[in-house]
Amino acid sequence: MSFFLETLAGGLLAGVMYALVAIGFVLIYKASGVFNFAQGAMVLCAALTFVTLTERDVPFWLAGLITLAIMVTLAVAVERVVLRPLVNRSQITLFMATLGLSYIIEGGSQFVMGASVHELDLGISDLPVAIGPIQLSSFDLVAAASAGALVIALWLFFERTRIGVSLRAVADDPQAALSIGIRLPVLWATVWAVAGFVALVAGLLWGARQGVQFSLTFVVLKALPVLIIGGFTSITGAVVGGLIVGAADALAEIYLGPLLGGSVSTWFAYGLAVAFLLVRPAGLFGERAIERV
Amino acid sequence: MSRLSRVLGAAALAASLTAPFSLPSAAFAQEAGAPAAKQYIPLATYRVGAYASSGTPVWGGTIDYLRYLNEVEGGINGVKLTWEECETEWAVEKGVECYERLKGGRDGSPVPLFLPHGDPITKALTEKSAADKIPLLTTGYGRTEAIDGRVFPYSFTVLFSFWSEASSAINYIAEQVGGKDKLKGLKIATVYHDSPYGKETQVPLDLLAKTYGFENIQIAVPHPGNDQSAQWARIRQIKPDWVFLRGWGVMTPVAIKTAAKTGFPVDHIIGGIWSGSEEDVRPAGSVGKGYLAITPFPAGAEFGILKKIKAAIVDQGKSDLKDLKSFGSVYYNSGVIETIIAVEAIRTAQARFGKRPLTGEETQWGLEHLVLDEARLKELGADGLVQPLRLSIKDHEGGGAGKVLQWDGAKWNIVSKGWVKSDRELLLPVIYERAAAYAREKGITPRSEDTAEASAK
């Protein structure tokens, strides 16, 4: 029984890490209806910038601030150069633009900061901690706490600030929001900057776990089923989706994998996502869109 | 008249349009007729993309050695070397495109051999290269059955095949536990990248388990391997005595970190060839201390040839490396080792065909007659760096041994007593059987040593 609980807890904590990446997607989708394919590249860019600075003896907090400033600058540039010229274009056009953007950010990051693998030590122990009958990673517990804090901060931002209310207005009805004087470019730049901050947090935690390297962009692969299950428009959905995917993946790998003679976590989360699509297309917490056709 | 003028006009137009294309080909033909001064070597590289961190130091070693040869030794027997890079991003389609683009040679020099740098690219090129008569030289990767050159005349899985890698790892464990008879009853888990490369050692490990009586446990990690909590939870449940880790890219540091957080002793994990570089273990941080790896590419900057390259190239500011920290690393040394083998094969072929740029067919003969014994390795300054090799038509691997390295938190140290040999006498009959099955499936008539020699003449 303790082994089952340990596997379940390990999976839930891994799911929190996926949720961190998924939240970045949700932010941009909520504000502009765009599935931002470049979120993984933003995670890489943020982590690579941070580690490049700390390796040059820039203090930890200053490196964080400089990286945040760079991510905000990137957000403003994306709004000016990519999104503004594409206003009123179809969603698939915007999606393709973010696809191109991901290559530019990935290539640009490697061009400027090199392709080497970097160690990132956040000073958080990653050794096992005994909690009752089960062993958990202290690093995973810190990651879960960070994700919790991030969700609360984002909730406060969306619910309690003027910009947050404007963002919700744009998400509900962009035309009506524009007609009452809400400035869309400012909002887009803001939401991309917040997504950049989320990418920084995700990049630091994933970078500390696996090293800062190009494969950070691959973490988005698991964020997709998280989004489908949780819903594209809900931060709570991203967290719940992450927990479901993490737990289901770990349990399937342990109990189903040996029966099928191989690794199942490559496809299991996607299979689960397809099942959700069939039963609940908008995901657990997503908004149901009703359109006249 | 008007019709004539139209015909003449069309002819003039056609001539003017084709002239720019026909002139260079005439020039090329002229150059091709006369011996070219330089031997061209195409390099399929990956300096961008997911695996750039692994590739960049390799080309550092390759290019620094080529530069050393040109600047210090005047090339190979006076034939200078020229090279050209083609970016593959380690992707099969780009690797095949590079091969097709570069196989025609350059400035009159044919292509002596091709270094595909990627197991999937190698498998995709096996038949093309045989048709084009361009040897594929793969060191530490590639199709294991290609050891049988009777069936695979143009594929050279030189040095250390994946089967030898698995066998040497088991033999190292045997050394640690007090002999092969002590392997009986041990639990050895292989944590592998879930890909054809990762699965390549399943057959030899099964055979070795039956021979020595250890329990062979196989645990797959899906690509890219950035979360392995479930796999290592299984390890905790099974409690193996040793883990053989066959990763690629991010899978290795994540495996080391996850092993540590689940409490598995890192000094009982032996990484395979592609889990045994500084780039694999450094991101794991302090928990990587004690981790082992088996490799045909020992790390270190104290080998004779490395000292020569440092003095003539690196210290002169001519190194291809941007980050000189990689000098003497596993990947840098792998580039040097691979290039030494390629160059020595060309040198061997030159002794027979003449001191000029060689074709793939001629270099294939050089590869199949390559002898790198202790004396020659000492002469090159590569003793201890490259294992003694003797290739033949029946043996495109030649070596089949690796050294075991241990990470001390900052660098690799060699901890095995010399080269740990694999059980080639046990594995080769199975490899030959599989090669023969491939020949039957593809309708290939295997060469004999006599037919190979006759075709070389």
Image (cartoon, rainbow, N blue to C red):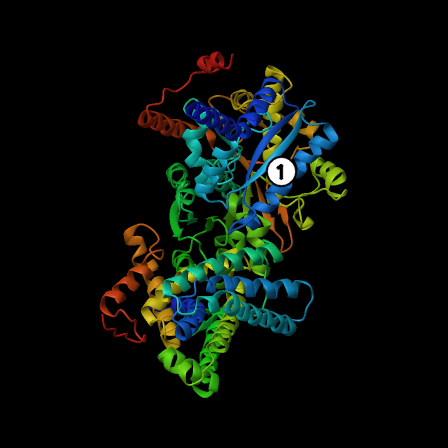
Closest to the observer, A163 or B81: A163
Q: Which picture quadrant has residue A167?
A: bottom left
Q: Which picture quadrant has residue A204?
A: bottom right
Closest to the observer, A183 or A70: A183
Residue A262 at x, y percent in the picture: 33, 51
Assign a secondary structure to mark 1.
Answer: helix
Left or right: where A285 falls relative to B20? left
Q: Residues within 10 Å of mark 1 (few under 14, many from 20)?
A: many
Closest to the observer, B220 or A194: A194
Closest to the observer, B453 or B230: B453
Image quadrant holding the N terminus of chain B, namely top left
Residue sitting at 25 percent across and 64 percent down? A275
Residue sitting at 54 percent across and 53 percent down? B267
Provide the chain ID for the residue under circle 1. B
- Which residue has dot 1 on it? B62
Vertical comparison of B369 with B195: above or below = above
